[in-house]
Amino acid sequence: MATLDVATMVPTKFTPIAKRHFYFAIEGIDAFLIKTAARPTISTEKVEINWINSQRKIAGKTTFGSLAVTMHEAVAPAAAQQVMEWVRLCYESVSGRGGYPDFYKRDIQIKMLDAPGNVIQLWDIKGAFVTEANFGELTYEGSDLTEISLTIEFDNMVLQY
């Protein structure tokens, strides 16, 4: 009877991707301000077709979930200013004017890196805009740093690898 050893069960070229090895690029926002980011989620509805005593299923409409991004807030460069400049392209709170999608929609790239820093996955996200900007709460207690949380919606995405 043959025995199994670890060397035969685990592929020798298996290298997992570390969560911390990413580069998140949005036009107008400094990449080093990004603290955490979610990769895209995809959901496809199922359509059920009933016929006599059976049922078939086919794919329905596909939608993309929102992206959650957390940013470090800094004095310089001002992260809040960079976020508000993007938000104002969609809605200007002083005048009440709305913006055109051509101006407020931006493309995002999420680059997943290997240990030496080579790009191994490239998420190309198209037509992104901010649906929620949360500038966080303040407190006199503790030494916590301030953060900005964004919820971003988008039109489409492509994974290149």
Image: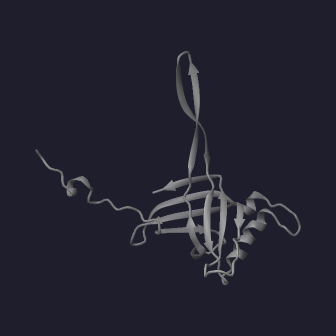
Which residue is the extreme one toward the bottom? 76
Query: Which sits in the foreground, 48 or 99?
Result: 48
Q: Vertically, is 158 above or below 83?
A: above
Residue found at x 70% / y 76%: 138
Quadrant housing the N terminus: top left
Q: In the rendered view, does 114 fall on the left or right side of 136?
A: left
Q: Position of residue 152 (x, y in %)?
A: 66, 59
Q: Position of residue 142 (x, y in %)?
A: 62, 81
Query: Which sits in the foreground, 59 or 107?
Result: 59
Q: Vertically, is 122 above or below 142?
A: above
**Which picture quadrant has residue 31?**
bottom right
Q: Position of residue 11 (x, y in %)?
A: 27, 56
Q: Vertically, is 159 above or below 49?
A: below
Q: Position of residue 104 (x, y in %)?
A: 73, 62
Which residue is the extreme one toward the right? 95
Q: In the rendered view, does 83 fall on the left or right side of 68?
A: right
Residue found at x 21% / y 58%: 7
Q: How many numbered dots are placed on residues in this image?
A: 0
Which residue is the extreme one toward the left? 1
Residue found at x 41% / y 67%: 114
Query: Which sits in the foreground, 40 or 118?
Result: 40
Quadrant housing the C terminus: bottom left
Q: In the rendered view, does 93 fall on the left or right side of 112?
A: right
Residue found at x 77% / y 62%: 90
Report the coloring of the rendering. one colour
**Which picture quadrant has residue 143?**
bottom right
Which residue is the extreme one toward the front? 141
